[in-house]
Image (spheres, coloured by chain):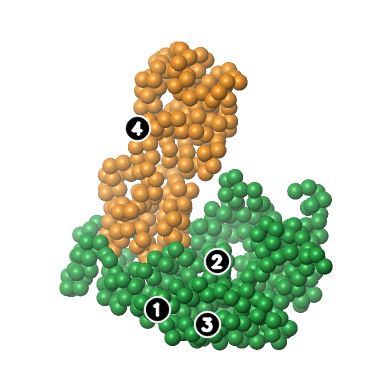
Chain colours: A green, B orange
Amino acid sequence: MSADQRAAVAAEAERILAFFESKGAERVEVDILQPSAQLLDLYGEDIRSRAYITRDAARNEMVLRPDFTVPVANHHMSNRKGPARYAYSGPVFRKQEPGSDKANEYLQSGIEYFGASDRAAADAEIFLVFRELLAASEARVATGDLGILLAAVEGLSVSDRRKSTLLRHIWRPARFRRLVEEYSNAAKVSKRRHELLVDAGCGKDLHRLVAGAGPVIGVRTTKEVIDRIRALDLDSMEEPLSGKEVEGLRDLLRIKGPMSAIPARLRHLSRQLPGLGRAAECLEARIDALSELGCDPSGLPFEASYGRTTLEYYDGFVFGWFSNASGETIASGGRYDLINEVLGSGRKCPAIGGVVRPAVLISAGRRAE
Amino acid sequence: MNIKIGVPAKGRLSGKSLDWLRSNGLGFNEPDLDRRYSVRAAGVVSAELVFLPAGEIPEEIRRGNLMFGITGADLVHEQQPDWRQRMEIQAELGFGNTRLMIAVPQFWIDVESVHDLDDVAARFRAEHGWGLRIATKYHSLVREFLRGIDLTDYRLVDSQGATEGTVANEMAEAIADLVSTGETLTANGLKTLSDGLVFKSQAIFIRSREVSLRSSDRPDIQEIMTWR
C-alpha cells in the first residue's frame, strides 16, 4: 500500500470512529498483543493457524489480536456491570493462505453494545448504525439469524445429548448435515462398537473390560470411559429423528426472501419444527423495531443460512455488506450472547457488535447520485 | 556452478539416502564421510553432497541454498505449506516409509474412530475445563487433518521427542506421531485409530525451483546422471 493510500485509509478509519462516537459509543483501546490461552480456548485450535503467535519468557504465549471482539468484551466484563457501548479502531492480524493476495494486517473499526436487555431494539439500532454508515456505498446487504437454527434444534424430538452435539456444530454445515443423517437412520455402528454396546447392555463388568484393554494412563479416567459407553448405549436405543423433522431442517436452511416475509414461513414450518414459533416471535420483534426506526424490512434480503460459515460464534441476528465491485466483505456483525456468557464466567450479558474494514469501504466506491 | 545436494546427516533416512545416490551413479569418497559436512561426489560435474539434519533440508531447498535434496515427505509438507511453488518432487524413493497417526490410550475402549473425539472432547471439557490436548511435532499436518474432520475443541501441545510418553505424564490426552511398526505405541499403552492416518510419508528426492542451472532447462536427476 502506498503512503497516500495508507493515509486515506487511516483518515477513513478516523471518520468511522467519530461516526460511531456520535452514536453514543465510548472509544476504547485494547492491546495489540493479547494472551493466547483464552482466545484459543474460545475459538479452538483452528484459529492458531490464522493467528500470529509469539512468546516470551515472562508472559508465555501471546497473539497479535486477530479481532477486537474478545478483547473489548473482556474489557467490558471485567470493568462494568451496566450497559455500555464501545467504539474502536486499529490494526488486526491474520495469516492468509500461501499465494493469497489478501492483506495479513489491516485496519478494522467497530462498535459493540453490551447489556442492552431489549435485544430486538439493540439489533435494529446497531444494524441501522451500519446502514447509515454505508448508505452511499456501492454495496449489497445480507441478513440472517443463527437463533432460528438454534431454536429449531432446541425443539427437536431428540435427547439432550444429541441436541448439544448438534448445537456444537451449528457453525459447521458439513458436520451438521452428517449428524442429522446419522440421527435420522437407525445408527449404523461398527462390529466392535456393536459388541461393546452388547456387553454394556447385558450388564458385563465394564471396569474389567476397560482394565483389560491397557494401562490406565493420562488425565481421562476409567469412570469417564465407562460413562461414555453407557451414554453411547442409551444413544443407540434412541428413536431416529423423524423424516418430518429432517425435511423441516432442510427447508429451513433454504429459506430466503425479504425479511418481512420470513416470520410467516417460520410459522408454517413450525408444524414440523416446533422450536420455530419462538424464533418467529424474535424475528417479528426485530422487524417491528426496525420499522419503528424508519427502516422498511420488506427491502432487506434475509437468508436463514447466512452467517453459518463465515461468522463463527454469532448466535442471533447477523448482517453484512459486500462490495458490488469485488464481492469482498466491507462490514459484518451480529449477536454473540453465548460466547459473552463464557467470557463473563457464566454471567449473562447480551452482546452485539459489528466491524467495518475502512480499506474495503474506500475501494467499494460510492453510488452515483 | 556447484550443484549442491542435501543429504540427511544421520537418523532413519541417512544410510539409505547414500545407498540410493550410489545406485544412481553418484559415488563419493568413503573416508570423507566421517569428518566432513560436505563431500564432492565423484563422476558428476562439480556436484557436492551437503550433510544436514533431514529437518533442515526443506528450508534450504526453499531458499535455494541447495539445488537438490533428500528428505522425508512429512517434513516438506509440514514445514512448507506452499512447497509446490518452491520445489518439485523428482522421485519417491521407496524407503523411510512411515505414517503419521493419531493415537489414544488403549483403555479408551469407547474410542475407535477419530469421529469419537468430538464427543470425547466435549465431555472432557465439561469434566476438566479444557479441550483435548494432542501432543505432536507435526502441527500443520495435524491441524489440517483435524479441520478436515471438523474437530475444533482441542489444543496442540508441542512435543519434539518422546511423544509417546506425554499421555502417561499427563501432558496430553492423545498424540499424533510417526508410526512404523506400532511397537513403541503399544509399549506405552497407546493405540492408533482406524481412520487416524494423518499423513503417509516416505523419502523423496526434491529439486528447488529457486535455482536454475546455467541458462539451460531445469535439470532433473536423470540429466545430472547423464553428465558424467
Q: Give the secondary structure at mark 1.
A: helix
Q: CA distance from mark 4 to mark 3?
A: 62 Å
Q: Report x, y in % for residue B127.
A: 40, 70
Q: Which residue is mark 3?
A: A265
Crowding at mark 4 (Cα within 10 Å: few <14, some 14-19, many 20+) = some
Q: Chain of mark 4?
A: B
Q: Chain of mark 3?
A: A
Q: Chain of mark 2?
A: A
Hey, what amino acid is under mark 4? Phe
Q: Residue at x 23, y 58 (%)?
A: A213
Hey, what amino acid is under mark 1? Glu
> Is disc 4 on the same chain as disc 1?
no
- Is residue A116 something one can see in this rendering? no
Q: Residue at x 35, y 62 (%)?
A: B116
Name the disc covering residue A312, or none.
2
Q: Nearer the viewer, mark 1 or mark 3?
A: 3
Hey, what amino acid is under mark 3? Arg
Q: Which residue is mark 1?
A: A245
